[in-house]
Image: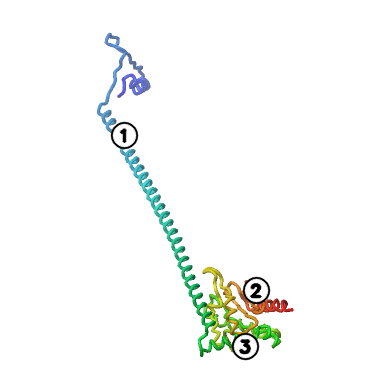
């Protein structure tokens, strides 16, 4: 809508004065009816159209706003649900890990108990076998080679007398404890180790390599195999105080075995592949041990430490 006074000044006055050379005028009616109002042109259709259009625009804006709000709300809800699912998943994984850890601890505990039980059974069995052995040695059966050999050993002279009768110490090599990871190398390592013992004792005029649990080609003729009556076995020579402990010599068994072997010195070697070598020399007369522990796993180191234990033994004999 537009009032006539505004229309006159914007659309009528200027063109009329410039083109028609006239000066139009506008004024109010000089009648009592004039109440300081004005004439107004009103386009009802245009107003309706604009109103309708504006209403449509507003409605569209509101719809879009509602849609955006709904989308944002849906996204927030989805995000919340994802967070909740992730939280539940992490809680389940944590619970699963705790259960797995508990099961692993229980499994290790049961395994340890089983190992301790098996070791106790083994110890009991060994004790029983040892008791039977001692009983059979005290009361030997008649007409058996074992009994004859044992009785013959009891009738021999004392260890001092035997040493006095010769000018060297008789050395016995007991089973070598071999624990390696390189399969197929066992025989080669044993052969080289026994050859090393033969070489070191061959250079020592006071010690003679006399007895061995195993023989290889190339050893001196003076080296003899343990007799059948001795029956020295690795599982008796080497023992473990616990399942996780390292093998070490069973000195009481070595004492019993020597009643038949008639040796002056016992030599024991343990070789753990990739770890170390341990050397034990046992003097039966003095019941003294000479050891070299944690030697590098190379033959040169074994030879060097074999010489050291023999040198320590000779030093005590002076």
Give residue 238's position: percent from left, percent from top.
56, 76
What is the spatial separation of the Cα atoms under label 2 and label 3, in whole angstroms? Answer: 24 Å
Looking at the rendered image, the disc whose residue lies closer to the viewer, 1 or 3, is: 3
Considering depth in this image, is 226 or 308 the residue closer to the camera?
A: 226
What is the spatial separation of the Cα atoms under label 1 and label 3, in whole angstroms? Answer: 115 Å
Give residue 7's position: percent from left, percent from top.
33, 22
Q: Earlier in the sequence, mark 1 or mark 3?
A: 1
Q: How many marks?
A: 3
293 up-or-down from 99: above or below: below
153 up-or-down from 302: above or below: below
Q: Secondary structure at mark 3?
A: loop
Give residue 301's position: percent from left, percent from top.
65, 76
Residue denoted by label 1: 58
Considering depth in this image, is 45 or 248 the residue closer to the camera?
A: 248
What is the spatial separation of the Cα atoms under label 2 and label 1, in whole angstroms? Answer: 99 Å
Name the quarter where the C terminus is drawn. Answer: bottom right
Q: Which mark is residue 292?
A: 2
From where the camera sits, is residue 252 visible? yes
177 up-or-down from 144: above or below: above
Residue denoted by label 3: 223
């Amino acid at each position: 809508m537009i009032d006539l006074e505004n229309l006159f000044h914007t659309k009528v006055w200027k063109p009329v004065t410039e083109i028609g050379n006239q000066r139009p005028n506008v004024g109010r009616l000089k009648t009592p009816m004039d109440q300081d109002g004005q004439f107004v042109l009103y386009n009802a259709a245009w107003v309706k159209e604009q109103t309708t259009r504006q209403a449509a625009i507003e409605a569209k804006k509101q719809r879009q706003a509602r849609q955006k709000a709904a989308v944002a709300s849906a996204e927030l809800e989805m995000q919340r649900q994802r967070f909740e699912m992730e939280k539940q998943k992490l809680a389940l994984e944590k619970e699963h890990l705790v259960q797995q850890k508990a099961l692993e601890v229980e499994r290790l505990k049961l395994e340890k108990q089983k190992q301790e039980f098996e070791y106790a059974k083994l110890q009991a069995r060994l004790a029983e076998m040892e008791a039977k052995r001692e009983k059979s040695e005290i009361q030997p059966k008649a007409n058996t080679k074992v009994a004859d050999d044992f009785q013959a050993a009891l009738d021999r002279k004392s260890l001092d007398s035997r040493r006095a009768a010769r000018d060297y110490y008789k050395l016995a090599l007991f089973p070598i404890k071999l624990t390696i990871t390189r399969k197929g190398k066992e025989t080669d390592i044993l052969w080289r180790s026994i050859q090393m013992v033969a070489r070191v004792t061959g250079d020592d005029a006071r010690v003679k390599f006399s007895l061995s649990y195993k023989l290889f080609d190339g050893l001196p003729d003076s080296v003899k195999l343990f007799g059948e009556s001795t029956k020295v076995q690795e599982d008796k020579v080497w023992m473990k105080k616990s399942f996780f402990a390292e093998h070490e010599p069973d000195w009481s068994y070595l004492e019993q075995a020597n009643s038949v072997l008639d040796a002056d010195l016992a030599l024991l070697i343990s070789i753990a592949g990739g770890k170390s070598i341990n050397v034990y020399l046992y003097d039966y007369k003095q019941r003294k041990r000479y050891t070299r522990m944690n030697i590098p796993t190379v033959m040169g180191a074994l030879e060097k430490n074999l010489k050291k234990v023999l040198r320590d033994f000779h030093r005590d004999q002076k």
